[in-house]
Image (cartoon, helix red, strand yellow):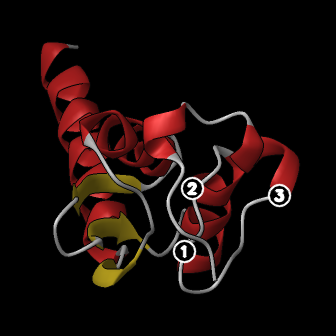
């Protein structure tokens, strides 16, 4: 009985590793507009809230966001949208004016 249980556990473990091996990990960089450390925290938190995002790092000097994500769980469009939903324009998605207007005064960046 113990041998059968160990064999079953081994098979399940192998299958879970196989399914994870097929997932494609992707890295991307893109512009996100903001100003300060408070912006950085909100932008990174928004990106990380998207299922499948494994890393998000925004540089306030360069305005460049670096993300790592699982393409089986998400895509760049969803990440851009999540950031825009908290008030920050990306190079592909503009935040709604009402959400942008609710940002703290130091977070209001110059919009195009």
The residues bearing labels 2 and 3 have C-alpha atoms spaced at a distance of 11 Å
Q: Secondary structure at mark 2?
A: helix
Per the image, the residue denoted by label 2 is: 83
- Do the numbered discs 2 and 3 sit on residues whose CB atoms are within 8 Å? no
* The image quarter in which residue 52 lies: bottom left
Q: Is residue 4 left or right of residue 80?
A: left
- Establish if 82 lies above or below 48: below
First in sequence: mark 2 or mark 3? 2
Q: Secondary structure at mark 3?
A: loop
**Which tag is nearer the camera, tag 2 or tag 3?**
3
Residue at (56% x, 75% y) in the render = 75
- Which corner quadrant holds the N terminus? top left
Most distant residue in the top direction:
1
The residues bearing labels 1 and 2 have C-alpha atoms spaced at a distance of 7 Å
Question: x and y percent of residue 67 in the render?
Answer: 29, 67
Per the image, the residue denoted by label 3 is: 96
Per the image, the residue denoted by label 1 is: 90
- Do the numbered discs 1 and 2 sit on residues whose CB atoms are within 8 Å? yes
The residues bearing labels 1 and 3 have C-alpha atoms spaced at a distance of 12 Å
Q: Residues within 10 Å of mark 2 (few under 14, many from 20)?
A: many
* The image quarter in which residue 5 lies: top left
- Which corner quadrant holds the C terminus? bottom right
Q: Residues within 10 Å of mark 3 (few under 14, many from 20)?
A: some
Question: x and y percent of residue 47 in the render?
Answer: 45, 51
Depth check, front residue: 78 or 1? 78
């Amino acid at each position: 009985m113990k041998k059968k249980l160990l064999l079953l556990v081994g098979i399940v473990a192998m299958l879970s590793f196989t399914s994870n091996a097929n997932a494609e990990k992707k890295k991307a960089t893109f512009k996100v507009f903001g100003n300060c450390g408070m912006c950085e925290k909100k932008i990174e938190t928004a990106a990380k809230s998207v299922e499948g995002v494994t890393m998000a790092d925004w540089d306030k000097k360069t305005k460049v966001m670096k993300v790592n994500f699982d393409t089986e769980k998400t895509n760049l469009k969803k990440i851009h949208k999540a950031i825009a939903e908290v008030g920050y324009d990306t190079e592909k998605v503009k935040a709604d004016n009402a959400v942008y207007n609710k940002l703290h005064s130091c977070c209001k960046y110059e919009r195009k």
